[in-house]
């Protein structure tokens, strides 16, 4: 599964074909004579490369114009996280790290 430019181009073409096919990864891999796990690995690898980096910006409650925010909503890709009231920053960071691994 080398990470050469030729391999990258080949797997990128397969991932694009899979997306257009409407098939599951398993069905496409069977049809194309590929290993499902390898196609899945490249699908995730290429998706991570295409993903926009997430930047956290500190917003103080006073800047929101309210004493306490009712709800903060963050959408990253297909995930949406809503945080109400007080929260621990490290917990939210761990949530995003977990979701990035599932992309």
Image: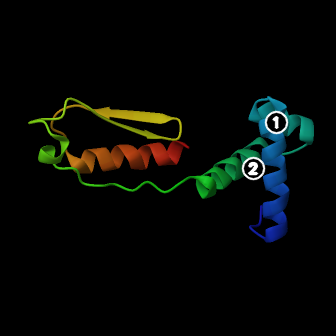
Q: Residues within 10 Å of mark 2 (few under 14, many from 20)?
A: few
Q: Please identify the quarter of the rendering in which residue 29 is found.
A: top right
Q: Indicate the secondary structure of the residue bearing disc 2.
A: helix
- Spatial distance from mark 2 to mark 1, Cα to Cα? 18 Å
Q: Residues within 10 Å of mark 1 (few under 14, many from 20)?
A: few
**Residue at 19% across, 42% down:** 64
User: Which residue position holds label 1?
Assistant: 20
Q: Is residue 46 left or right of residue 84?
A: right
State whether residue 94 is above or below residue 71: below
**Residue at 22% across, 50% down:** 59
User: Which residue position holds label 2?
Assistant: 38
Residue closest to the eye, 31 or 78 = 78
What x and y, as percent, mark residue 82?
Answer: 32, 32
- Of badges 2 and 1, the one in the foreground is 1
Residue closest to the eye, 37 or 74 = 74
Residue closest to the eye, 84 or 3 = 84
Task: Locate the C terminus by quadrant.
Answer: top right
The numbered mark, 2 or 1, whose residue comes first in the sequence reads 1
**Residue at 41% across, 50% down:** 97
Q: Is residue 84 left or right of residue 67?
A: right
Q: Indicate the secondary structure of the residue bearing disc 1.
A: helix
**Residue at 53% across, 42% down:** 102
């Amino acid at each position: 599964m080398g990470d050469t430019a030729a391999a990258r181009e080949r797997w990128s073409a397969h991932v694009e074909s899979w997306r257009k096919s409407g098939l599951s990864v398993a069905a496409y891999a069977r049809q194309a004579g590929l290993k499902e796990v390898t196609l899945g690995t490249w699908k995730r690898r290429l998706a991570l490369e295409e993903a926009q980096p997430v930047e956290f910006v500190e917003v103080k409650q006073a800047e929101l114009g309210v004493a306490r925010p009712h709800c903060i909503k963050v959408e990253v890709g297909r995930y949406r996280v809503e945080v109400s009231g007080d929260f621990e920053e490290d917990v939210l960071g761990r949530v995003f790290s977990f979701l990035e691994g599932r992309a």
